[in-house]
Amino acid sequence: MRDKTLLQALILGLGQVGAKILSLIFLFRFSNDLGKEAMSLYVYAYVPFSIFADLSCFGLIPGTSKLVSRLKGEAEDDKINYLLKRGTIYSLIAGVGFFLFMLFFSRQILSVSLFDGYDNETFEGVRTNLLLASLSLFVIPIINFYKGFLQGHLIMYPSCISIITENVIKIVLYVLISRYIHDINIIHLVFIIYFSSYFISLIILLVFIFPFYFKKKLKFKAIINLLSTSIPFGFATMFFTIYQFIDSITLSILLPIEGYYTAYMFETIRLIFFPIVIAQALGGALNPKMNYMFKEDKVEEARSLAIKCSTLIIYILIPLTAVMKYFATDIYNLFYKQENGAKILYHIADLIIFFGLYKVLIGISLGLPKAHYIIIATIISAIAKYALNYLLIPHFGYQGAIYATILAISICIIVAYYVLFAEKMNLFWVNIKALIGALFACFLSVLLVVIFRVGFYLGAYPAYYSIGLYSILILGIYYLFLRFFRQTKGLLHNIN
């Protein structure tokens, strides 16, 4: 049971990591073609679009996944098939509604988030980009609903296939179009490319969804159940979107420097999501499985799985965070060219462990009876994030936004541990021990690699070669240290 869950998480994680790599390849080519100044016009349209795209499918993937898994646990397959029909209609209405919202309120949205000193021509150009981007809102909610529906059945590979294909289509279409268009108008066409790739992703998911439409259906209050499940998930799982929305407002006011805004809000965030998607995939696979286990009263098995997965993600994310910080300059310069971007990446990499751990804790805890505390904590943390941004950014610049995020998300993490503790799943001290062990092993591995590089003067390699070679070396030594610590602990336990 556990191995199947981890296998599904691995499939989903590989798909998401692969999609991130393809996305960065696309953006690397795109940003080099546009240049720094024109790229900012893209970013100021893309950031509000991405925020409202997340809001349009508020909690749909985890909420639908949980509802489907719950109905499966209750042997209500007929209701699941009816949910598919009604959920499809709801998703289409949500997409149209959010597109109309962006259409009518695009000026107000940009007037809040756009940098100071823009002229009317720049404003209208960004607004046109935002409206073209908003076309994708027609299909994004239904894509997320279908992914949640399939993941509720623990079928992860369609999501993997669709997201990989989506990003391949972006690259192929961009390469074909960029041969003929080289000016700023290519931004308009890129957002049309986005819509085309999302549409093809939807068609792929429909291939897997289609057989469910012909199965027996049983009417029930599908939309009410879907909303009551998705909205709590929306608050808890969209904390990053909420924080990003707050940053998009406060940074443009308190730190009105285009280069910093683009590097912080768009470029470095995309880079740190490489390791975070591993946790996101694991949390996504855990959510329906934990919900099913509690329905079947398999609490001890659920506890064992929770301990295994939460410690596993700590062991994975700690060395990846260290690699991201150690090679911040090389990694950033492989993809982007902002002069301050590498420095921002070094500091923002600290968010990896916080975001990653919380995504796994959410996957474990949101199916439990006291999960409403997490929703309350998320709302409180959003308020805290907003207040801390205004308090810290004037004194620490972009680092103030990072500190505010760490403090705000810590509220959510502590409450998640409380919810688990209340259900006799005390993970806190187990995770603390894993964190200490991982940090110590990581420190030693990085130290040995630094000594090795300095001692043998092995620093003059191309960036991509250096990153690959020494990352493998760091991770390999780290793994050996962990094995040594575990063997030593087991030996001492046997002696006692």
Image (cartoon, rainbow, N blue to C red):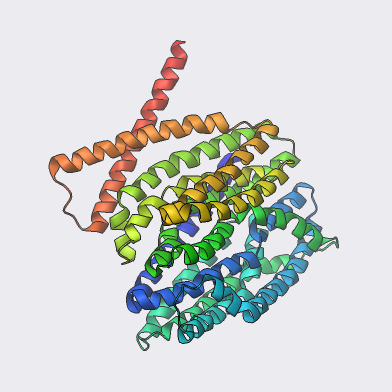
Q: Percent position (x, y) of residue 360?
A: 56, 45
- Residue 373 at x, y percent in the picture: 70, 43
In percent of the image, x 33 and y 78: which residue is there? 33
Whether residue 447 is visible: yes
Left or right: 382 in relation to 253:
right
- The residue lying at 29 percent from left, 56 percent from top is 329
In the drawing, does residue 280 fall left or right of residue 272?
A: right
Location of residue 48 (image quadrant):
bottom right
Find residue 191 and report its horizontal and vertical position in percent: 50, 79
* 209 vs 443: above or below: below
**Quadrant location of the N terminus in the rendered image:** top right
Count every numbered label the image shows and give the total. 0
Of residues 433 and 159, which is closer to you in this image?
433
The percent position of residue 192, horizontal first and vertical second, equals 51, 81
- The residue nearer to you, when weighing 415 against 261, is 261
Residue reaching furthest top? 496
Name the residue at 53% across, 65% down: 249
User: Is residue 274 in view from this perspective?
Assistant: no
Q: Is residue 21 rendered to the left or right of residue 87?
A: left
| Residue at horizontal 46 percent and vertical 73 percent from the top | 116
Front residue of 436/226: it is 436
